[in-house]
Amino acid sequence: MAVNIRNRSYAIGALVDIPGPGASGVLFAHGGRFGGHSLYVKNGRLTYVYNFLGDEEQRIIATQDLPTGKQLILAASFDKDGEASPGVATGILSLHYGDRKVGEGRIQTQPGKFTLAGEGLTIGRDSGEAVTSDYPGKAPFAFTGGTLHRVAVDVSGDPYVDLEREAEAMLARE
């Protein structure tokens, strides 16, 4: 079972060793072509795609090449700051190499589950219906050129609550 990131802030971090240039492929993928998100390396840069209902691929690409070394943390974090409509979170997605921010952009997240086809969550590859057509290489788009030790998804913060919207909804019922 995959962690529920719907309508809340979250972070995805991958612990990797990258001995030299040439790392490529999927670190994390959840969902598929009709909705999902993925953290991957392409052209020497960390990339994150949020596929909104198979309708729009929202892509954030790092502004700097990947570092090399051992025990590196490559991460994406989404900070929810509102809702476009009920359940459609909006906010800033940031990319990080360790503590250094290397990219950001505004995205919106879909309100429901990513897929009905059961693509699920994969680490080190995307073996279902690919989240994006932007992946480097061929299916299953495995991570190569380094060692992927682990991936963690953090949703430890409180879910975002729009108190004004909740108050309006409560008053509308009376």
Image (cartoon, rainbow, N blue to C red):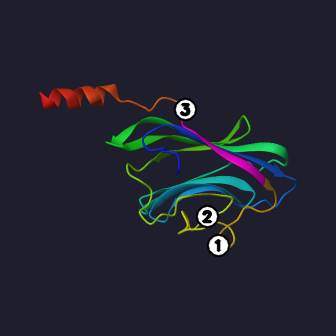
Q: CA distance from mark 1 to mark 3?
A: 33 Å
Query: Which residue occupies 82% across, 50% down?
Result: 17
Is the residue marked by circle 2 packed among few (<14), some (14-19), or many (20+) residues within 10 Å? Answer: many
Q: Which residue is mark 1?
A: 139
Q: CA distance from mark 1 to mark 2?
A: 7 Å
Q: Which mark is residue 156?
A: 3
Measured as percent of width and height from the top left, residue 124 is found at: 69, 59
Q: Kindly indicate the quadrant of the structure image that contains residue 26.
A: bottom right
| Helix, strand or loop for disc 3 | loop
Q: Amino acid at mark 2?
A: Asp
- The answer to which of 132 and 125 lies nearer the viewer is 125
Q: CA distance from mark 3 to mark 2?
A: 25 Å
Q: Amino acid at mark 1?
A: Ala
Q: Kindly indicate the quadrant of the structure image that contains residue 141.
A: bottom right
Q: Quick one: label 3 or label 2, which is nearer the N terminus?
A: 2
Q: Is residue 78 visible?
A: no
Query: Which residue occupies 41% across, 59% down?
Result: 53
Q: Quick one: label 1 or label 3, which is nearer the N terminus?
A: 1
Q: Does residue 121 sit above or below 11 in this rendering?
A: below
Determine if the magenta segment contains residue 151.
yes
Mark 1 touching mark 2, by CB under 8 A? yes
Principal secondary structure, stretch drawn in magenta: strand
- Residue bounds of the magenta highlight: 148-155
Query: Which residue occupies 44% across, 48% down?
Result: 109
Mark 3 touching mark 2, by CB under 8 A? no
Query: Which residue occupies 81% across, 43% down?
Result: 71
Determine if the magenta segment contains residue 9.
no
Is the residue marked by circle 1 packed among few (<14), some (14-19), or many (20+) residues within 10 Å? Answer: some
Q: Does residue 128 sit above or below 161 in this rendering?
A: below
Measured as percent of width and height from the top left, residue 104 is found at: 59, 43
Q: Which mark is residue 64?
A: none
